[in-house]
Image (cartoon, helix red, strand yellow):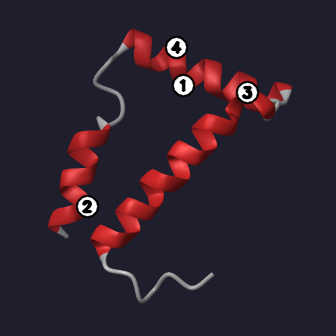
Amino acid sequence: MNINHLSTEEKVRLAEELWESAYQEQSSAPINDEHKVILDARSAAFENDQKVGTEWHLLKKQLMEE
């Protein structure tokens, strides 16, 4: 799939649609132990310092401005 011809806005919309689709299917996709360890560590890091990472609406705004 070549997405180079898409505008930034179209790419963000596509990412949102992919994310929503993946979210809806998450219950049917098992998480292996290695990935679970990584996710647990990231979740713990966020709980310890909620400044880690970027909120989606802020990241989206930043991407749309580029």
Work out how far the residue at label 2 is from the one at label 4, CA to CA, in angstroms: 27 Å
Say which residue label 4 marks.
44
8 relative to 38 in the view: left or right: left
**Sequence-first tag of 1 and 2:** 1
Name which residue type carries label 4.
Ala
Number of other residues with Cα within 10 Å of mark 2, as a class: few under 14, some 14 to 19, many 20 or more:
few
**Sequence-first tag of 2 and 4:** 4
37 relative to 47 in the view: left or right: right
Work out how far the residue at label 3 is from the one at label 2, CA to CA, in angstroms: 29 Å
Name which residue type carries label 2.
Leu
Nearest to the eye among marks 2 and 4: give it. 2
Residue 63 disc label: 2
Judged from the image, the secondary structure of the residue bearing numbered disc 1 is: helix
Work out how far the residue at label 1 is from the one at label 4, CA to CA, in angstroms: 5 Å
Work out how far the residue at label 1 is from the one at label 2, CA to CA, in angstroms: 23 Å
Question: Which quarter of the rendered picture does the N terminus lie within?
Answer: bottom right
Judged from the image, the secondary structure of the residue bearing numbered disc 2 is: helix
Number of other residues with Cα within 10 Å of mark 4, as a class: few under 14, some 14 to 19, many 20 or more:
few
Name which residue type carries label 3.
Ser
Say which residue label 3 marks.
27
Nearest to the eye among marks 1 and 2: give it. 2
